[in-house]
Image (spheres, rainbow, N blue to C red):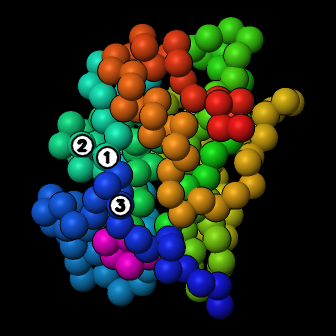
Amino acid sequence: MINTKNYLEESNIIDYSNEKIQTLAKQLSENIFSKEEIVKNCFEYVRDEIKHSGDYKLDIPTCKASEVLDFKSGWCFAKSHLLAALLRANKIPTAFCYQRLALSEYKKDSFSLHGLNAVYLENYGWIKIDARGNKTGVDAQFIPPQEKLAFSLCENEYDLGVYYSRPLDVVVEALNKNRTYEEMISNIPDLKSTI
């Protein structure tokens, strides 16, 4: 059994004591008896009910889990913060994971980090889940033990391969500094910024 204590902690960003997060976390786990079902409910809520700021070109800056829930929007990173808060409120160990992807969708010949989560389930170990939001060409699902993420890695793209207990500082800084869609697209965090 691994030590999952750090993957259950609350922080300023993963503020799961927030009343609205607590209420939603309870609703999504009501009358459910398996952790897998709770994960699925929380994952599908964030994936389907929270708009991806990039897809909708929203000028609504969110970073903290409670902000994402209040405004029902966020970049992939911010959505991962809300999902972590909902799962940790339900005592399910949740990590932050990152991929480095080509950014052809927004900026030609550039790369950025992409934020997602992993949950620790006794029956499977760590399972990655990606609640960025589905659209044409993106079909992320929670179907353990298989991982069905938003993006398949292509040449020159890679998974950082780390289960972080806290969001990367470069991600939090980008979400707090860039207040509009255009600012975020121009300054989306990349791995080079984390070194």
Q: Secondary structure at mark 1?
A: loop
The tag on residue 10 is none
Question: Upstream in the sequence, badge 3 or badge 2?
Answer: 3
Q: Amino acid at mark 3?
A: Ser
Q: Earlier in the sequence, mark 3 or mark 1?
A: 3
Which residue in the structure is indicated by mark 3?
Answer: 11
Residue 141 seen by the camera: no
> Decide: marks 1, 2 in contact (CB < 8 A)?
yes
Relative placement, left or right, of 45 versus 21 is right
Q: Nearer the viewer, residue 138 or 58?
A: 58
Residue 53 percent coordinates (x, y) = 38, 27
Q: Which residue is mark 1?
A: 64
Q: Is residue 161 above or below residue 26?
A: above
Amino acid of disc 1: Lys
- Name the mark on residue 67: 2
Q: Quadrant of the C terminus?
A: top right
- Mark 3 packing: few (<14 Cα in 10 Å), some, or many (20+)? few
Residue 159 in the figure: left or right of residue 73 = right
Q: Which residues are magenta?
A: 88-93
Q: Is 91 placed above or below 100 here?
A: below
Residue 19, position as x, y percentages in the image: 13, 63
Secondary structure of the residue carrying numbered label 3: loop
Residue 135 seen in this snapshot = yes
Indicate which label's residue lies in the foreground, 3 or 1.
Answer: 3
Is label 3 in contact with label 2 (beta carbons under 8 Å)?
A: no
How far is disc 1 from disc 2 in space, using C-alphas? 5 Å
